[in-house]
Amino acid sequence: MKYSRHQSVIGKEAQKKLMDSSVAVVGVGALGCVAANLLARSGVNLILIDKDVVSVSDLHRQILFDEKDIGSKKVDIAKSRLEKINSDIKIDMYNIDLSSENIKILERCDLILDCTDNLETKFLLNDFAVENKIPLVHGSATKDKGYVFNILPGRPCLNCFLGGSKSLMTCSSAGVLNYLTNVIGSLQVSQAFKILLKENYEKDLIRFDADKIEISKIKVNKKKDCSVCKEP
Ligand SMILES: [Zn+2]
Protein backbone atom coordinates (compact mmCIF):
# COMPACT_ATOMS: atom_id res chain seq x y z
CA MET A 1 0.00 0.00 0.00
CA LYS A 2 1.20 3.46 -0.99
CA TYR A 3 1.43 5.01 2.48
CA SER A 4 2.08 1.89 4.57
CA ARG A 5 5.56 2.92 5.75
CA HIS A 6 4.18 6.24 6.95
CA GLN A 7 1.03 4.75 8.38
CA SER A 8 3.08 2.34 10.54
CA VAL A 9 4.49 5.41 12.30
CA ILE A 10 1.61 7.90 12.41
CA GLY A 11 -1.43 5.56 12.30
CA LYS A 12 -4.31 5.05 9.87
CA GLU A 13 -6.49 7.91 11.11
CA ALA A 14 -3.61 10.38 10.90
CA GLN A 15 -2.78 9.26 7.36
CA LYS A 16 -6.42 9.75 6.37
CA LYS A 17 -6.36 13.23 7.90
CA LEU A 18 -3.30 14.13 5.82
CA MET A 19 -5.04 12.87 2.66
CA ASP A 20 -8.06 15.06 3.46
CA SER A 21 -5.86 18.14 3.93
CA SER A 22 -4.92 20.89 1.53
CA VAL A 23 -1.67 22.81 2.00
CA ALA A 24 -0.64 25.94 0.11
CA VAL A 25 3.05 26.07 -0.78
CA VAL A 26 3.86 29.72 -1.46
CA GLY A 27 7.12 29.95 -3.38
CA VAL A 28 8.21 26.90 -5.37
CA GLY A 29 11.93 27.51 -5.00
CA ALA A 30 14.40 25.58 -2.87
CA LEU A 31 12.19 25.22 0.23
CA GLY A 32 8.98 24.88 -1.79
CA CYS A 33 10.37 22.08 -3.99
CA VAL A 34 11.43 20.05 -0.94
CA ALA A 35 8.19 20.67 0.95
CA ALA A 36 5.87 20.04 -2.03
CA ASN A 37 7.75 16.83 -2.86
CA LEU A 38 7.36 15.44 0.67
CA LEU A 39 3.74 16.57 1.00
CA ALA A 40 2.77 15.06 -2.37
CA ARG A 41 4.39 11.73 -1.46
CA SER A 42 2.43 11.84 1.82
CA GLY A 43 -0.91 12.18 0.02
CA VAL A 44 -1.54 15.84 0.92
CA ASN A 45 -3.43 17.98 -1.63
CA LEU A 46 -1.53 21.05 -2.77
CA ILE A 47 -1.95 24.63 -3.91
CA LEU A 48 1.29 25.80 -5.57
CA ILE A 49 2.01 29.50 -6.02
CA ASP A 50 5.03 31.01 -7.77
CA LYS A 51 5.54 33.74 -10.37
CA ASP A 52 8.99 32.70 -11.63
CA VAL A 53 10.49 30.60 -14.39
CA VAL A 54 13.30 28.09 -13.82
CA SER A 55 16.79 29.52 -14.29
CA VAL A 56 20.13 27.72 -14.44
CA SER A 57 21.20 29.05 -11.02
CA ASP A 58 18.14 27.37 -9.41
CA LEU A 59 19.18 23.83 -10.31
CA HIS A 60 21.70 23.26 -7.51
CA ARG A 61 18.94 23.34 -4.89
CA GLN A 62 15.46 23.30 -6.49
CA ILE A 63 15.00 19.57 -6.63
CA LEU A 64 11.88 19.35 -8.82
CA PHE A 65 13.62 20.94 -11.83
CA ASP A 66 16.28 19.87 -14.32
CA GLU A 67 18.17 21.41 -17.26
CA LYS A 68 15.40 20.99 -19.81
CA ASP A 69 13.04 23.03 -17.57
CA ILE A 70 15.08 26.25 -17.84
CA GLY A 71 12.77 29.04 -18.99
CA SER A 72 9.56 27.17 -18.07
CA LYS A 73 7.15 28.27 -15.36
CA LYS A 74 8.06 26.69 -12.03
CA VAL A 75 4.45 25.89 -11.10
CA ASP A 76 3.84 24.11 -14.45
CA ILE A 77 6.90 21.89 -14.09
CA ALA A 78 6.34 21.25 -10.37
CA LYS A 79 2.70 20.26 -10.92
CA SER A 80 3.47 17.81 -13.74
CA ARG A 81 6.38 16.26 -11.79
CA LEU A 82 4.35 15.92 -8.59
CA GLU A 83 1.43 14.37 -10.49
CA LYS A 84 3.81 11.70 -11.76
CA ILE A 85 4.94 11.10 -8.17
CA ASN A 86 1.38 10.81 -6.81
CA SER A 87 -1.63 10.83 -9.14
CA ASP A 88 -4.07 10.49 -6.21
CA ILE A 89 -3.68 14.04 -4.94
CA LYS A 90 -5.29 17.25 -6.22
CA ILE A 91 -2.86 19.99 -7.23
CA ASP A 92 -3.98 23.54 -8.03
CA MET A 93 -1.39 26.00 -9.24
CA TYR A 94 -1.17 29.74 -9.73
CA ASN A 95 1.50 31.49 -11.77
CA ILE A 96 1.07 34.79 -9.96
CA ASP A 97 2.86 37.34 -7.84
CA LEU A 98 0.93 37.01 -4.58
CA SER A 99 -0.61 40.32 -3.48
CA SER A 100 -3.36 41.65 -1.24
CA GLU A 101 -5.65 41.56 -4.31
CA ASN A 102 -5.26 37.85 -5.08
CA ILE A 103 -4.36 36.35 -1.68
CA LYS A 104 -7.97 35.25 -1.17
CA ILE A 105 -7.11 32.05 -3.11
CA LEU A 106 -5.52 30.86 0.14
CA GLU A 107 -8.80 31.05 2.08
CA ARG A 108 -9.72 27.43 1.34
CA CYS A 109 -6.46 25.78 2.44
CA ASP A 110 -5.89 24.14 5.84
CA LEU A 111 -2.35 25.42 6.25
CA ILE A 112 0.11 27.72 4.49
CA LEU A 113 3.82 27.04 4.06
CA ASP A 114 5.83 30.22 3.58
CA CYS A 115 8.64 29.13 1.26
CA THR A 116 9.24 32.62 -0.16
CA ASP A 117 12.47 34.58 0.05
CA ASN A 118 11.25 38.14 0.43
CA LEU A 119 10.01 40.01 3.47
CA GLU A 120 7.15 41.76 1.70
CA THR A 121 5.42 38.46 0.85
CA LYS A 122 6.30 37.02 4.26
CA PHE A 123 4.49 39.89 6.01
CA LEU A 124 1.58 39.65 3.55
CA LEU A 125 1.20 35.95 4.41
CA ASN A 126 1.56 36.68 8.13
CA ASP A 127 -1.19 39.32 8.09
CA PHE A 128 -3.52 37.09 6.05
CA ALA A 129 -2.92 33.98 8.18
CA VAL A 130 -3.47 35.83 11.47
CA GLU A 131 -6.63 37.56 10.20
CA ASN A 132 -8.12 34.37 8.76
CA LYS A 133 -6.88 32.08 11.56
CA ILE A 134 -5.07 29.79 9.13
CA PRO A 135 -1.89 28.12 10.47
CA LEU A 136 1.27 29.39 8.78
CA VAL A 137 4.67 27.70 8.86
CA HIS A 138 7.38 30.26 8.13
CA GLY A 139 10.64 29.08 6.58
CA SER A 140 13.78 30.89 5.50
CA ALA A 141 17.29 29.84 4.52
CA THR A 142 20.30 31.94 3.55
CA LYS A 143 23.99 31.03 3.35
CA ASP A 144 24.39 28.37 6.06
CA LYS A 145 21.54 29.29 8.45
CA GLY A 146 17.85 28.56 8.31
CA TYR A 147 14.75 29.23 10.40
CA VAL A 148 11.31 27.69 10.88
CA PHE A 149 8.53 29.30 12.90
CA ASN A 150 4.92 28.26 13.43
CA ILE A 151 2.33 31.04 13.48
CA LEU A 152 -1.02 29.97 14.93
CA PRO A 153 -4.03 31.81 16.39
CA GLY A 154 -3.24 33.30 19.79
CA ARG A 155 0.50 32.78 19.36
CA PRO A 156 3.21 35.35 18.48
CA CYS A 157 3.33 36.28 14.80
CA LEU A 158 6.11 37.28 12.42
CA ASN A 159 5.48 40.96 13.13
CA CYS A 160 6.11 40.31 16.87
CA PHE A 161 9.80 39.69 16.21
CA LEU A 162 10.56 40.89 12.70
CA GLY A 163 8.28 43.95 12.66
CA GLY A 164 10.06 46.98 11.27
CA SER A 165 12.63 44.91 9.35
CA LYS A 166 13.12 46.32 5.91
CA SER A 167 15.27 43.76 4.20
CA LEU A 168 16.22 40.13 4.37
CA MET A 169 19.39 38.63 2.96
CA THR A 170 18.23 36.61 0.00
CA CYS A 171 19.65 33.58 -1.75
CA SER A 172 20.25 35.66 -4.86
CA SER A 173 22.38 38.17 -2.97
CA ALA A 174 24.08 35.97 -0.36
CA GLY A 175 23.83 32.41 -1.71
CA VAL A 176 22.62 29.31 0.09
CA LEU A 177 23.81 25.75 0.72
CA ASN A 178 21.66 23.13 -0.96
CA TYR A 179 21.71 20.71 1.98
CA LEU A 180 20.48 23.53 4.23
CA THR A 181 17.35 24.14 2.14
CA ASN A 182 16.60 20.40 2.20
CA VAL A 183 16.73 20.42 6.00
CA ILE A 184 14.61 23.56 6.40
CA GLY A 185 11.96 22.43 3.86
CA SER A 186 11.79 19.08 5.66
CA LEU A 187 11.44 20.77 9.06
CA GLN A 188 8.57 22.86 7.68
CA VAL A 189 6.80 19.67 6.60
CA SER A 190 7.41 18.09 10.02
CA GLN A 191 5.64 21.05 11.61
CA ALA A 192 2.85 21.05 9.01
CA PHE A 193 2.12 17.41 9.91
CA LYS A 194 2.08 18.19 13.64
CA ILE A 195 -0.33 21.09 13.12
CA LEU A 196 -2.62 19.23 10.68
CA LEU A 197 -2.74 16.25 13.04
CA LYS A 198 -3.34 18.52 16.07
CA GLU A 199 -0.19 17.25 17.75
CA ASN A 200 2.28 19.18 19.84
CA TYR A 201 4.01 21.51 17.36
CA GLU A 202 7.13 23.54 18.17
CA LYS A 203 6.33 26.87 19.85
CA ASP A 204 9.84 28.37 19.67
CA LEU A 205 11.66 29.67 16.62
CA ILE A 206 13.75 26.79 15.26
CA ARG A 207 17.23 27.78 14.05
CA PHE A 208 19.48 25.41 12.16
CA ASP A 209 23.17 26.12 11.62
CA ALA A 210 24.36 23.94 8.74
CA ASP A 211 28.00 24.86 9.35
CA LYS A 212 28.15 23.75 12.99
CA ILE A 213 25.33 21.20 12.56
CA GLU A 214 23.51 22.78 15.47
CA ILE A 215 19.80 23.08 15.99
CA SER A 216 18.63 25.61 18.55
CA LYS A 217 15.29 26.94 19.73
CA ILE A 218 14.69 30.59 20.43
CA LYS A 219 11.76 31.78 22.52
CA VAL A 220 9.62 34.40 20.81
CA ASN A 221 7.31 36.53 22.92
CA LYS A 222 4.08 38.07 21.74
CA LYS A 223 4.75 41.77 21.23
CA LYS A 224 2.53 43.93 23.36
CA ASP A 225 0.29 45.95 21.04
CA CYS A 226 1.48 44.08 17.93
CA SER A 227 -0.43 45.73 15.09
CA VAL A 228 -1.12 42.34 13.49
CA CYS A 229 -1.90 39.76 16.19
CA LYS A 230 -3.16 41.90 19.09
CA GLU A 231 -6.47 40.46 20.19
CA PRO A 232 -9.33 42.92 20.67
ZN1 LIG B 1 2.25 39.75 16.36
Image (cartoon, rainbow, N blue to C red):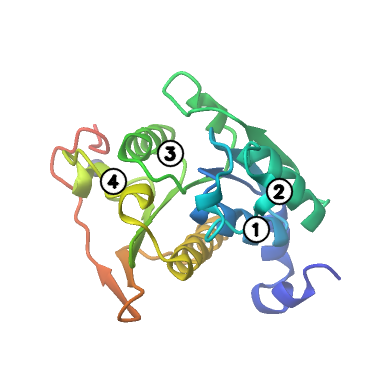
Residue under pointer 4 = 158
Closest to the camera, between mark 2 and mark 4, is: 2
172 vs 220, left or right, is right
222 vs 81, left or right, is left
Mark 1 vs mark 3, CA separation in Å: 26 Å
Residue under pointer 2 = 68
Residue at screen point 66% across, 35% down? 93
**First of labels 2, 1 by sequence position:** 1
Residue 88's spot in the image, x, y percent? 82, 51
Closest to the camera, between mark 2 and mark 3, is: 2
Helix, strand or loop status at disc 2: helix
Residue 103's spot in the image, x, y percent? 49, 27
Residue closest to the eye, 41 or 109: 41
**Image quarter hosting the C terminus:** top left
Mark 1 vs mark 4, CA separation in Å: 26 Å
Residue type at mark 3 is Lys
Report if the beta carbon of the residue with label 4 is closer than 8 angstroms to ligand 1.
yes
**First of labels 1, 3 by sequence position:** 1
Residue type at mark 4 is Leu
